[in-house]
Image: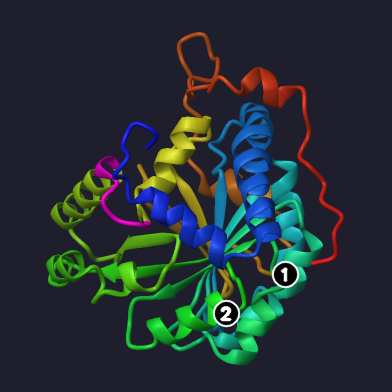
Amino acid sequence: MLCNEDSAYYQLIRNTVSHVDHETLKSVGINVGYNSWTCGAGELRRQQSRLGVQIPWTVMIQEKNAGGPALDIGRIDELITQGKALGIYTYLFHCREAGFIGQTERLASSHPDCGFVFFLPSGAVSEATARMMQFFRNAVFVIPADAFCMQSAKLLREHRCFFGVYAVYQDDTIHNILLSRGNGCFLNAFCTFAFLLAAPECGENSKKEAWSFVDHHRTQQRDPVFWVDSSDLSAVGKMIGGGANILSLDTAGGWNVFGEEEKAGTYDVTGESLEDIMKRAMPPAKTDAAGEEAARVPPAENFSSRYHPLKRKENL
């Protein structure tokens, strides 16, 4: 960026610093960049060696209607506490109902050392919800690129929330989404992040096309947004040594693993620990001939092993 005077990332930085609460920027940066990717990564590798399975750097929670017992906020709170003991300090939420967002405020305040990313449903941002979201000092909100996008973005900017825009693509929609930049939402919402998310049934050619687009635009720095592809989640896991697979838990009691391997199953929403779920769900940790962890260890290993996650005490 410093070698490119015409980089659109200068405008991206101006937009973000102008529109986002500075305490939120600091909290998210520390919680994800340091607590999760640096210090947490060291603990993650140690726990991975102990358990013998890959431990993902992030866990997804998907809101899903349940016919029976459901994973409630209290249990999610417990799972996050257990996740931190394994070195996991970043959590992604896929919300189906606007009301679910209000319940998660407890999680953000109970875990000020974690980073949260909330993918919101269409039309979820109102004046009331935006006013509430401004107190999530350790969260990024991601809104869909749809008819409500510009109105939602305006409210989020007014309340100085940290946010992005996402589009879910399929084989028959990927071309239009890329050509139109999400009908203009990605570039006109003054957001920080632009997420391209592959639908479950999407083919490999479409995924490659999306990744090629993201990689090109990040390299060229042509747009004042930071493009993110679905595969980036796996790439981060590889870089910090946790493996390329991500664990997703839905509130109805189902789990899914995706990345290099794909598998699914169920868990007990009323009491099964995150460690026990991972022992059943996650692939074995990769080892070399000597039985040592073969996951790539970044240069921050020595640094992260001597320090601990920052415990932020502010009331959110």
Sequence-earlier tag: 1 or 2: 2
Q: Is residue 74 magenta?
A: no
Picture quadrant where residue 188 is located: bottom left
- Where the N terminus falls, by quadrant? top left
Q: Is residue 171 left or right of residue 231?
A: left
Residue 79 drawn at (x, y percent): 71, 58
Q: Residue furthest top?
A: 290
Nearer the observer, 316 or 205: 316
Q: Is residue 101 above or below residue 283?
A: below
Question: What is the count of numbered marks?
Answer: 2
Q: Residue beneath label 1, please?
A: 270
Residue name at image x 85 percent, y 59 percent: 314
Q: Quadrant of residue 77?
A: bottom right
Q: What amino acid is labelled 2 in the image? A: Glu
The dot on residue 295 is none
The answer to whether any part of residue 190 appears in the image is yes
SS for dot 2:
helix
**Which color scheme does this rendered protein use?**
rainbow
What are the residue bounds of the magenta stretch? 219-225
For marks 1 and 2, give the one nearer the viewer: 2
Is 221 within the magenta? yes
Instruction: Give the residue at mark 2.
Output: 158
Q: Position of residue 175 (x, y in %)?
A: 12, 66
Quarter of the image with the C terminus in it = bottom right
Q: CA distance from mark 1 to mark 2?
A: 39 Å
- Tell me if residue 69 can be seen: no
Residue at 29%, 44% (x, y): give it.
Answer: 6
Callout 1 amino acid = Thr
The crowd level at tag 2 (other Cα within 10 Å; few <14, some 14-19, many 20+) is: some
